[in-house]
Image: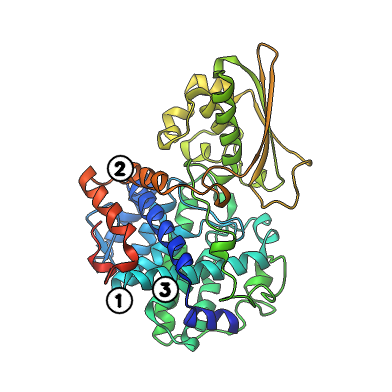
Amino acid sequence: MTSLVDFLVHADPPPDARGAAARAVLDTVGVTLAGASEPVARIVQRTIAQEGSGPCRVMGTPAVASAGNAALANGTAAHALDYDDMCFVSLAHPSAPLVAAAWAVAELSGATGRALLDAYVVGFEIEGRLGRAMNPRHYQRGWHCTSTIGTIGAAAAAARVLGLDATRAGHALAIAASEASGLKENFGSMAKPLHAGLAARNGVLAAQLAGAGLTASPAALEGPQGLLAAMDSERSTLAPFADDLGRRWEILDTGITVKLYPSCAGTHPSLDALLDLRRAEGFTADDVDRVEIGVDAITPTILLYDRPSTGLEGKFSMPFCAAAALVDGRVGIDTFEDARIKDPKIAHVQSRVTMRVDATLDASAPALTQARVTVRLKDGRVLSTGANGARGYPERQASDDALAAKFLACAARALPDPAARKALATIRDIEGAASIRALAL
């Protein structure tokens, strides 16, 4: 664990890495504001309110809470719509736990915007190395990396903001290793967004406990009964993946995938392909006879619902997402309202959509990035196209204008327009903020 700890304490991220972190913070605050009114977020907010107040904001609400409870609430809200970003190395939604944890601790300690961004990068890089060592086996065995790997990343970010020394930072990572959990069987339920909140809260708690003197095993990650062994890691050691920390930056090499659809990332390449075909060929849902979608072997392990019964399940259903895209010509937050699941037109098209594993896809490509879509029309035409990534992926990065539009649309669910625009301007300049406490949201 020595290389992780040394990096955590001493890393000096380059400007481009902090710039990528700032974009991620902007996107994450936006989806947090949008998710704050979702039922799962409201349940968490009501629950933490019973424990009293504190110095940290629960975004999208007038409430304040302790650092741990604010991290729990904000992390849950950030993931509530499944609109938060992705990383295809950690196979996690990195920013929901990282931003929620780092932001809460920064408010608590009065840290600067630059400190928050550095902490984000540190947590992201450590998650990336864990992802390279542990996946795909860890993910395929049923662990939800947003929660498992995300807990370690959140602890690293919180420890960095708090300025823990190497000894205590090591204990924070080891404590977090015992807190990490999260099961993919809970996808499509309220427990999935809760995973992100728990990862954020547990990361804050691990750093606070370590800062107060609580100790843990230095072998908690790589020991014979440590995190890697217990959680079905692909490899038993972090070497050589951690050896290039501080020299190679995962946040720049692999990058962050910004979601432009509020559904599971495994649906995005197919949705892009379907919507592009629909626009280019001028057909509508009424013209469709059948849709066949080929995916990689991991995608069916997360798209669990062939016939979803709730909006949350719909986010993890390729047939529903594809049908909604064909019927509406778009996929947005309102697509996953429970009433839309029962829409007879969507249900009719959904019955004509099949998903299967396509062995001809590039096996060397990152999971969830490839698809092959075939649309058979009633007039006999067969339209087929491949997808390699989607809009918002690092190779097709969302523009600043697209990020701003997404932020404002999300923030509108919690803030009046002038406040949303002020928040956008504030977070765009976050690196120069003298104190996170002073930021207007």
Local crowd at mark 1 within 10 Å, few (<14), some, or many (≥20)?
some
User: Residue 1: in sight, yes or no?
Assistant: no
Local crowd at mark 2 within 10 Å, few (<14), some, or many (≥20)?
some
Q: Secondary structure at mark 2?
A: loop
Q: CA distance from mark 3 to mark 1?
A: 11 Å
Residue that mark 1 sits on: 109
Indicate whether 86 appears above or below 122: above
Residue that mark 2 sits on: 413
Q: Residue at x 59, y 30 (%)?
A: 274
Mark 3 and mark 1 residues within 8 Å of each other at the beta carbon = no
Residue 92 placement (x, y as % from top left): 55, 57
Residue 394 placement (x, y as % from top left): 55, 52
Instruction: Please tell me which of labels 1 and 2 falls first in the chain.
Output: 1
Indicate whether 336 appears above or below 190: above
Which of the 4 quarters of the picture holds residue 235?
bottom right
Residue found farthest to the right: 360
What amino acid does circle 2 point to?
A: Arg
Q: Is residue 23 left or right of residue 417?
A: right
What amino acid does circle 1 point to?
A: Ser
Q: CA distance from mark 1 to mark 2?
A: 29 Å
Residue that mark 3 sits on: 158
User: Residue 211: in sight, yes or no?
Assistant: yes
Residue found farthest to the top: 379
Local crowd at mark 3 within 10 Å, few (<14), some, or many (≥20)?
many
Q: Is residue 88 left or right of residue 260?
A: right
What amino acid does circle 3 point to?
A: Ala
Q: Quadrant of the C terminus?
A: bottom left
Q: Residue at x 48, y 73 (%)?
A: 13
Q: Secondary structure at mark 1?
A: helix
Residue 437 placement (x, y as % from top left): 25, 68
Q: CA distance from mark 3 to mark 2?
A: 28 Å
Q: Secondary structure at mark 3?
A: helix
